[in-house]
Amino acid sequence: MVRTFLGYPRSNGTVGVRNHVAVISVMDNCNPVTRAICQAVDMTLPVTTLFVRGQYGHDLEVAFNTLAGMGRNPNIAAVLLVGLEEQTTEEVARRIRPAGKPVESINLQPHGTINAVAEGTRRALKLAVAASAARRAPCPVSSLLVGVECGGSDTTSGLTCNPTIGAMADRLVADGGSVIISETSEFLGAEHLFAARAKDEAVGKAFVEAVVRLEREAVSRGMDIRGTNPTQDNIRGGLTTIEEKALGAMAKAGTSPLRGVLAYGEAPAGKGLHFMDAPAPAVENLTAMAAAGCQLIFFGTGVGNPIGNMVAPTVKVCGNVNTLRTMADNIDFDASEILEKSAKVGAVGDRLYDFAVEVASGTRTTSELLDIRETAISRFAPTI
Amino acid sequence: MPRAIVLDRRDNVATLIDSGQPGQACTLQGEASGELVLLQVVPFGHKVCVRATPAGGDILKYGQVIGKAAKPLAVGEHAHIHNVESARGRGDKAEG
């Protein structure tokens, strides 16, 4: 029997787990207008950004593609772009249109702030009224693309939340769904184990090259990455080296074969487990996953990291009894029974998979309800 | 009594899932059993050495190398950044 959740089927065959109108800033100077429109209209989500103006080449391409990727995400019913001027706004708009959803734009030049807010609010209202006509319907779990992330890790992460997320990921992949693991630096010391799971030599090589490139860059700067990764809170939580952290972080990917390697924010072409080459810090990594089309993200934490993504609801999974007590308002799923009651990871993973179906069907996460959400696109070159 | 988990039979460190005090006995679980006496405070989630390891020796957890001993480690010793070193991303040790 095909496992289903209640999702929003989209015209292009994808399925949303939420139904929002995204109001997307094309560059940082548009953020105040984006926020003002979102305060005025229910169902809207502000997707703000920093920079873009002054970016060029590959760095600018990544910014445009990431903003557009969030607009194309199946959780988004319609998009209102807020730009400074027409041409740059169009660069983002033309990348979203192929997804087949309404894309409108408002530019600050020559309207000025008050008129841009007024006109943007009118347009967002119309988009939201139309989007609200969508209804949830049973959809196969194979339509889910799920990101797996960790942050605020400690030694409980590699023993509880990450393997639980991995068990859930295995079940989703077995049911025809897809998973993205990322955070390139957090494979240092574990890359040989993960590379062995690649579907072929080319995929394994592409993955290892991403890890080697990153380590070479850190070393070429003459820097010691200790204290940056593992972070100070990782160290307080008992993680001693990046190798130890990586071995625990990799558990989020479960045991299925690695099907492909993706660039920052790139959508996978096929099903199954993929690796995305992107920086580890949560906000920029979650942004890349949402841009790749992840409808949901599972985020393992040990000492606690509350942040979630704007577009992809982020499920916080924790197995540290202390954090579950002190940061309960930031945790969605308790995996502490693994250490406290010797529960089997597989059984807790089954429970997390059930919860994944619930969240995909509309159960809200704490980061959505408390609006602990942020967007940041990684930078790959200096501004000019 | 504090508990510590050994994840692989080859491991020379175990992870405490309670906090431990010096002189306290600690029960080993997982891929090893028995007890050892903690030599220092070992906070929740931190590691204790379960097999004497010379300076420069590999530190193993999950049956994998997670770093090198920067100093000799005795059984019951708190194993962390003061006596275990990462071998990766070490631009500070790069030649040239």
Image: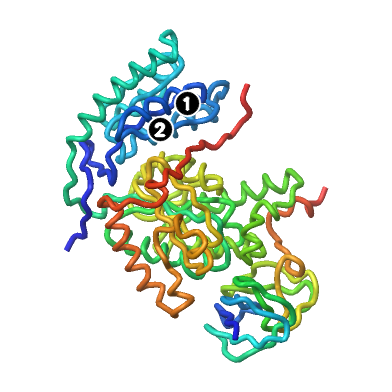
Quarter of the image where the C terminus of chain A is located: top right
> As rendered, which of B36 and A87 lies closer to the eye?
B36
In the figure, is residue A341 to the left or right of A151? left
From the image, tell me which residue sits under label 1.
Answer: A31
Query: Residue A209: percent from the left, percent from the top?
Result: 57, 49
Task: Give SS at disc 1.
Answer: helix
Q: Farthest residue in the top direction?
A: A110
Task: Give SS at disc 2.
Answer: strand
Tell me where residue A333 sits by quadrant: bottom left
Residue at 37% across / 30% down in the picture? Answer: A38
| Amino acid type, residue under disc 2 in the picture | Pro
Query: Residue A212: percent from the left, percent from the top?
Result: 62, 51
> As rendered, which of A361 and A112 lies closer to the eye?
A112
From the image, tell me which residue sits under label 2.
Answer: A46
A34 over A235 or under it: above or below: above
Residue at 34% across / 29% down in the picture? Answer: A96
Sequence order check, earlier mark of 2 and 1: 1
Query: Residue A33: percent from the left, percent from the top?
Result: 43, 22
Task: Return the chain for callout 1.
Answer: A
B3 over A326 or under it: above or below: below
**Looking at the image, how many numbered discs can be counted on the residues?**
2
In the figure, is residue A305 to the left or right of A19? right
Task: Return the chain for callout 2.
Answer: A
Query: Residue A131: percent from the left, percent from the top?
Result: 22, 33
| Amino acid type, residue under disc 1 in the picture | Asn
Do pointers 2 and 1 mark residues of a single chain?
yes
Is any atom of residue B90 visible in this view? yes
Alpha-carbon distance for marks 2 and 1?
8 Å
Quarter of the image where the N terminus of chain A is located: bottom left
Q: Are marks 2 and 1 in contact (CB under 8 Å)?
A: yes
Residue at 44% across / 79% down in the picture? Answer: A341
